[in-house]
Amino acid sequence: MLKSFESLFDIYTVYVQHPVISKWLAFVLFLSLFLNTYLLNITKQQQQQQLKQEQQQQKVVADPVSTDTIQKPVTKKPVKPKRKHHHHSDIVRPVEEILGLLATPDALSDEEIISIVQAGKLAPYALEKVLGDFERAVIIRRALISRASLTKTLEHSLLPVANYHYDKVMGACCENVIGYMPIPVGVAGPMNIDGELIHIPMATTEGCLVASAARGCKAINAGGGAITIVTADGMTRAPCVEFPSITRAAECKQWIEHEGKDIVAEAFNSTSRFARVKKLKVAIAGRLVYIRFSTTTGDAMGMNMISKGCEKALSKIEEYFPDMQIVSLSGNFCTDKKPAAVNWIEGRGKSVVAEAVIPGPAVEKILKTTVSALVELNISKNLVGSAMAGSVGGFNAHAANILTAIYLATGQDPAQNVESSNCMTLMKAINDEKDLYISCTMPCIEVGTIGGGTILPPQQAMLDMLGVRGPHPTEPGANARRLAGIICAAVMAGELSLCAALAAGHLVKAHMAHNRNTQPISATPPATPAEPVPGSCIRS
């Protein structure tokens, strides 16, 4: 035993004294200590974590309310801005006392505000400015109008008032506001327009309209979609001026059309970054001269922009013709919101053409009619019938229906549907009479993607869906032109579907089924239901 220890000690002495082996022995010893310490710490941490988990489980059992706090994360809900709290009291103070507190309207009740308006001390149109609370101003105005009306129903009517963007409306879209009118918004499509699938928003209360447009979209998609082109872009305004004689009127016309053309255009263009004169058309009626400015307006519809430019241009003309008298900034030769041949011939806003080819099988399967029936009906109804009526720009089935629904959904001026819905619908049998060619020509679509009703958030949402909201970042006017193209293509879908319904004799049946909320006309079904047969305009 002792010999064994002695031999081990001798070996150890040899290795310790060795210059290389001794260093390795020291390194191994140090590494062993480090690993042992590390493993010991890990073991202690695991024990501590197990102890904490046991304590937490005991706490959960003892206090079940805290379970939700531990297991469910707390999510902050968005806080809606609260309306200002104002004084509530059944006692209405004297008018003089109320006027003294008018600088702090929150200290006044609604009835007290009503009393000073009824006393003539505050104008109803100034409620928003005085109160600083738009929604409260609308509520008070409703009460005032209701109590002064014959029926006295408005104050507690179903016309909505709460949660609207009155801050966007005031000073821009409407005056003397008493609420807002919700209109259902449907969507037709998607429709392949110039290679892009577009969902078309339509605000309407006419049953079948959206469904009919959707059917037209489906038929057009079956042939590869619609192609659109903008052939002209120019909003118009035509001031009326007067001269002492027809000679001076003729001299002014001659000057504007020749040497004065650039002078007038330069004056007009100086008023805006986007308004640029493209064409001047001058007409004379006696001593009256009408100067029709046709100009680009960027992505705005542009009436305010062009009116400002016309004022500047007229002041420049007056420098050369001091005897000229301005009769009206708008002389109806424009023409705005009225039927006019000048718009149909010369164009106003965006002039757009859309076309599509629908395969014969799609005509029969989707539209339930035939190519020859559609072509015959279009000639008899949209062309000859409109000519018999002496129509101006009305050579279509119902272009105004689709256009106005999109106008309402996207914040356009609905009154401009008068000239904007001018449309000629043409149909032709092609490819050995097997397929249908359709086109819609609309020379005066007046739209914008900035200004007017497009500043309201719901309408902006629809423009966002179409991808045309606001000004185009690199090409001014491109968004407005794109919107005009979408409208023209949508009108074509509506034309196709309605004409097909007329050719097949389905129009009345569809409206009775979808546009009436009443009992059926007859509860007794026909004994032998007829098979659906592709119709014609002669044999429906």
Image (cartoon, grey):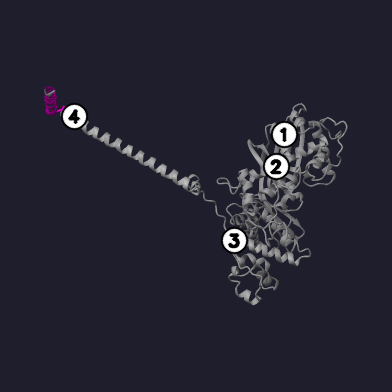
Q: Is residue 507 visible?
A: yes
Dominant SS of magenta comes to helix
Give the label, 4 or 3, closer to the camera: 4
If the image is split into quadrants, where does the N terminus sit? top left
Marks 1 and 3, Cα distance to the nearest angstrom? 50 Å
Point out the tag, 1 or 2, that comes first from the N-terminus. Answer: 1
Identify whether 478 is placed above or below 335. Answer: above
Q: How crowded is mark 3: few (under 14 residues within 10 Å), some or many (20 or more)?
A: few
What kind of residue is marked 3? Arg
Residue that mark 4 sits on: 25
Query: What residue lies at 70% left-to-right and 65% top-to-bottom?
Result: 143
Point out the tag, 1 or 3, that comes first from the N-terminus. Answer: 3
Give the label, 2 or 3, closer to the camera: 3
Q: Which of 115 and 212 is in front in this view?
A: 115
Query: What residue lies at 57% left-to-right and 55% top-to-bottom?
Result: 80
Q: Which of 89 and 285 is in front in this view?
A: 89
Q: Can residue 324 be seen in this view?
A: no
Residue that mark 1 sits on: 219
Q: How crowded is mark 2: few (under 14 residues within 10 Å), some or many (20 or more)?
A: many
Give the label, 2 or 4, closer to the camera: 4
Residue 19 lies in magenta, yes or no? Answer: yes
Residue 369 placement (x, y as % from top left)? 79, 32
Find out whether the residues at labels 1 and 2 contact each other: C-beta distance under 8 Å. no
Residue that mark 2 sits on: 488
Find out whether the residues at labels 2 and 3 contact each other: C-beta distance under 8 Å. no
Marks 4 and 3, Cα distance to the nearest angstrom? 81 Å
Point out the tag, 2 or 4, that comes first from the N-terminus. Answer: 4
What kind of residue is marked 2? Cys
Residue that mark 3 sits on: 83
Residue 271 placement (x, y as % from top left)? 59, 57
Find out whether the residues at labels 1 and 3 contact each other: C-beta distance under 8 Å. no
Identify whether 242 is placed above or below 523. Answer: below
